[in-house]
Image (cartoon, grey):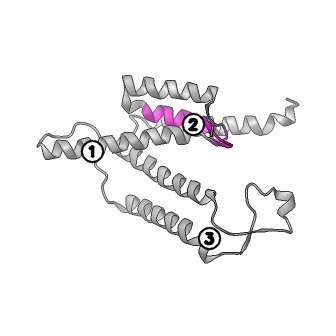
Amino acid sequence: MLSILTPIGLAFLVAVIVCLAISPRSLVWVLSAAVPFSHTAMVVVGSNGLSPFWCVGLVAVARLGYLQIRRVLRLRHSQRPRHGRPVKLTGATLALALFAVYGTVITAVGPALFRGVGVITPRGGLDSQIDNFTPLTYTTSNVAQLAYVVVGVLVVMYLATEPPRTIRVIEAAIIAGFAITLFKHFLPELGA
């Protein structure tokens, strides 16, 4: 299986490496910069692409793990942790945990529970499935969906553990995402 790093992927890889080398706390900026590229592949493995957001998200998850392990080791050696907040059980984290549990359970049990129910699959083509649904069964999409839910929840935990210094980073990601989406939507209508 051939794996390819795309040009946009190379740019994000360089950004992540520079960020981790110079200021790891600024990883949230790279993560925010990756939001508008949800339909762009950073890495292509076989016929499947992984977007920059999810690739940078995996780096954020690794950083979350590093921060939590470092915190535990410092507490064990009676040193006060300097970076990273502990993940605390609050109403928000409980809701996030319940969402993760629900997503995991329905992904694992749903296809067995609703086996044979007609659905429209992403690779079956919309036109050919309008009156000829595909029976629901386990596919590789179930594994991908579970991975997206778990990584998404862990990225939120990373943002709670090492929050951005300013909320502007989140605002910039949302504005850039809307702008690029609108641009891509209206580009065909402009004759490009």
Q: Residue beneath label 3, please?
A: 111
Give the secondary structure at mark 1: helix
Q: Position of residue 45 (x, y in %)?
A: 62, 40
- Give the distance between the C-alpha atoms of the residues marked 1 and 3, in whole angstroms: 36 Å
Q: Secondary structure at mark 2?
A: helix
Q: Amino acid at mark 1?
A: Ile
Q: Nearer the viewer, residue 11 or 111?
A: 111
Alpha-carbon neighbours of circle 2 within 10 Å: few (<14), some, or many (≥20)?
Answer: many
Against 1, is 109 above or below?
Answer: below
Say whether residue 128 is visible.
Answer: yes
Residue found at the very far bottom of the displayed protein: 113
**Tag 2: amino acid:** Pro
Q: In the drawing, does residue 11 fall left or right of residue 59?
A: right
Please, which residue is most extreme toward the front here? Answer: 1
> What's the magenta region?
27-48
Q: Name the kind of residue labelled 3 in the image.
A: Pro
Where is residue 119, by image quadrant? bottom right
Mark 3, other Cα within 10 Å: few <14 / some 14–19 / many ≥20: some
Quadrant location, the N terminus: top right
Residue beneath the point at 63% across and 57% down: 141
Q: Which residue is mark 1?
A: 69
Rounded to the nearest angstrom, the CA distance separating label 1 from label 2 is: 26 Å
Q: In front here: 123 or 152?
A: 123
Image marks 1 and 3: residues in contact by CB distance under 8 Å: no
Residue 36 in magenta stretch: yes
183 lies left or right of 109: right
Q: Give the numbered dot on residue 52.
A: 2
Of the two numbered discs 1 and 3 on the same chain, state the one appearing first in sequence: 1
**Residue 28 is inside the magenta segment:** yes
Check the image and name the residue furthest to the left. Answer: 78
